[in-house]
Image: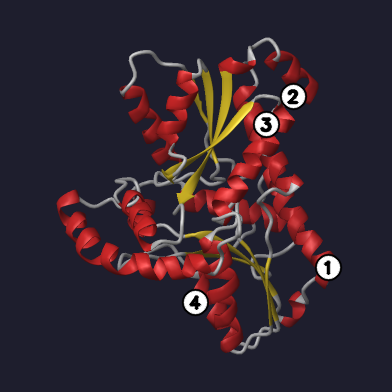
Amino acid sequence: MTECHFKRISSPPFPHSLLRSRLEKVKADELALVLVNLGTPKSLEVKEVRSYLREFLMDRRVIELPRFLWWPILEGIILRVRPRASAEKYATVWMPQGSPLDFYTKRQAQILHDELGIRVVPAMRYGEPALGDVLDDLSAQGVNRIAILPAYPQYSASTVASVNDAVAKWLLSRRVHPQIRLGSSFPTASAYLDALEDAVRAHWARVGRPHFDEGERLLCSFHSLPVAMDEAGDPYRSECLQTAAALRQGLGLSEEECLTTFQSVFGPAQWLGPATIDTVAELGTQGVSRLDVICPGFVTDCLETLEEIDQLNRETFVKAGGGDFHYIPWGNDSPQMIRALEEQARSLLSSW
């Protein structure tokens, strides 16, 4: 396969001082940035996990099946079995402060507030704080310019479009509308790729660069998507491959040295592959002595990175005969991650 080269996309030069000077012209209580992540159960109680899963899995953007077919399966089977198992998995990654995704999304919002000098509010597409409730609060406080920044580097109808749906639903309930700006994906944004590259290089500085000529590998694992959505025109797979190609190019690696896979398959439908868990098992069976894994699609650690990758996939790799397994965290509240989000925020806020 011919190696593709991708040019990094970045916003036009926009000095922080100029941004601040423009924002100072707008009263602080009239402008806000809402940072939206997927969501998480608010506690480890099975009923809370069930409530979260119900809201998530009832989203028509997530499960594109007719309601009359999907509802009996969800309520009669999935929500009777999965919540307890999911709660047990969440318990293995829960922090003293609560869910990692919730904690780090709030940290990102706070740091962005400090950097931008404007109100930055965290919100969740599912769970709390609910996006609609956040918009209610901002509107009640007189905020009339609201920028929505989805924390999804790659676009999918099941993620970014679902956030847009929630905003549109909120607008439909209002007689008077504030000005709203909707952010989108950023698969090859400059600061985002810098954050990924810096994390990999910092990891290599600590433990050494893999011996690629001896079979050691770097693996980029993205959340998977049903093939039916991809065939319907969803750009998600293409944007994941763009990110992976740009990261390979920046690190000077080949497709054989830096693999791209998809994780978190759910249900009997056909999903995008190759599957991360299958690839990890195959590499272990081959006796690969070291595997480094990074998850470019997750800007905060969560169940999918800490339990699925760093626990389940690690165990799979070692049991199959593999050697050292390294999960490379890159997002959360790292300075590089904040710069990546700030680049997107500045683009949304530039003329305000």
* Amino acid type of the residue tagged 3 in the rendering: His
Secondary structure of residue under mark 2: loop
- Residue furthest to the left: 68
Q: Is residue 29 above or below residue 271?
A: above
Q: Position of residue 113 (x, y in %)?
A: 67, 31
Q: Position of residue 342 (x, y in %)?
A: 68, 35
How many neighbours does mark 3 have within 10 angstroms: few (below 14), some (14-19), or many (20 or more)?
Answer: some
Q: Earlier in the sequence, mark 4 or mark 3?
A: 3
* Residue tagged 4: 278
Residue 256 percent location from the top left of the image: 65, 70
Using the numbered discs, state the Cα–Cα distance from disc 3 to disc 1 in whole angstroms. 32 Å
Which of the marked residues, 1 or 2, is nearer the chain's N terminus? 2
Image quarter where the C terminus lies is top right
User: Is residue 309 at least partly visible in the picture?
Assistant: yes
Which image quadrant: the N terminus? Answer: bottom right
Can you identify the residue that label 2 sits on? Answer: 14
Q: Secondary structure at mark 3?
A: helix
CB within 8 Å, label 4 to label 1: no
Q: Which residue is mark 3?
A: 113
Q: Amino acid at mark 1?
A: Arg
- Vertical side of 268 occupied by 59: above or below: above
Q: Nearer the viewer, residue 315 or 55?
A: 55
